[in-house]
Amino acid sequence: MLTNNHVANELIKFRRQVISDFLRRSRFDPFMGESSTSVIVRLADLEADGKQINIPLVNQLTGDGVGAGTLRGNEEQLDSYGFRIWADWGRNAVANNRASNKESSFNVRSTARDLLRGWGRRIVRDDLTDALFSIPTGAVQAGRLQTPGNRVNGIKWKDATTANKNSWVQSNYDRVLFGALVGNYTPGGTFASGMGNIDAVGDLMTAGIGSLAKQLAKQSGVDPANPGSYNGRPKITPWEIEELDEEMYVCFLGDRAFKSLQADPVMYQANRDARSRENNAVKTNPIFTGGALQYDGILYKNIPEITQRLLLKGAGTVGNVDAEPFFLCGQAAMAYAMGQMPRPTTLEDGDYDFVTGLGIETQYGVGKIAKNPQSSSLAPASDLGTLVDWGMVTGFVAAPPAA
């Protein structure tokens, strides 16, 4: 007869290295810089002190000048505005006592350190995603310096009222696109009226829709009713890549919209036939790698969090289809104001050193840059509903789930 082991005597091994959810770095990083020509402008002014920063926005001069006429008294007035960003804190920690740490099958402190670093990256990425689809205001954001805090300036889309959404789309009539046709939205209409024209077949994301959004960006600031004149609204300037002496727009879009764009025959053929043949196409060709596509002066960048956080369930009235926003960005579309770089913290006095803790602490604010038209006389705190997005066209496309 075979001898069986007693359950208390059986050998059990635990892997010391913990496997946690993988957290990738932000895909926003390549488009962030200190120059005003960056898509996301990094501001370090608050690192010394202060709670808010004013970003001066000045439209280009648009007048004809006077030639040989009298210049005095005919000078052109600067169209300027100060857009404000408030920073808030982000803090988190993991604590345990000596007893549980000693009996744990893995090193709690080293694991917590890695997870806290990942948490710090995640909240910045999530906040930037939420800021893309926020409604700018001239007032401090709700929940600042409270629990859990709020580093996103403006009103997050999930917290916006119907009136907030309508005033935003009406103020940004020349830089919103619903589906494949500019005529899907009539200036002065509601957000729901534009979404009501999106269907699951004709309004999937394509290279054509991206190029149409680009045309809106290029014509921003121009008065369509009076050729050759400007309407005093911000012009969306392409992102400049200095080392390549090239300019383009950057389009951030979620998983569902990106999948439709990959399947678009025009985009697929362009990447199949028009791209140069690399030595190792599997590593560099977007057909194989995914994540980014380029066509017609637009760099398309897949941001999975757009689908995860900003998906509009059943928003398209035609067929009750899910919809998803995409964001075509030029220079200074967003601001990232850094107050304090992430720093590690510790619990130094916890029950006679029996309780220990590791934490992380950072301070920053993010927001979509926007400007009031020169004709507005409202105080900054009253700018809700009148601000115009400075460097962004927002589009909406059908985003059905995977079949």
Image (spheres, rainbow, N blue to C red):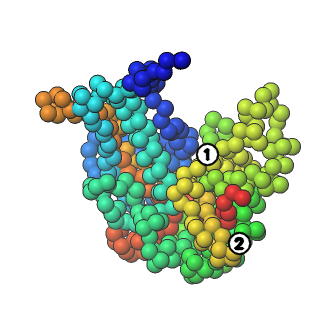
Q: Is residue 106 above or below residue 153?
A: above
| Residue 237 visible within the image | no
Residue 198: x percent and y percent? Answer: 68, 72
Q: Secondary structure at mark 1?
A: strand
The disc at residue 199 is: 2
Residue 319: x percent and y percent? Answer: 69, 75
Residue 25: x percent and y percent? Answer: 52, 38
Q: Is residue 118 above or below residue 41?
A: above
Counting other residues with Cα less than 10 Å from the Cα at mark 1, is it few (<14), some (14-19), or many (20 or more)? some
Q: Is residue 337 above or below residue 220?
A: above
Q: Please tell me which residue is depicted at 76% across the width and 33% down the height of the picture.
A: 282
The disc at residue 240 is: 1
Q: Nearer the viewer, residue 80 or 200?
A: 200
Q: Please tell me which residue is depicted at 17% across the width and 28% down the height of the picture.
A: 353
Q: Please tell me which residue is depicted at 58% across the width and 56% down the height of the picture.
A: 307
Counting other residues with Cα less than 10 Å from the Cα at mark 2, is it few (<14), some (14-19), or many (20 or more)? many
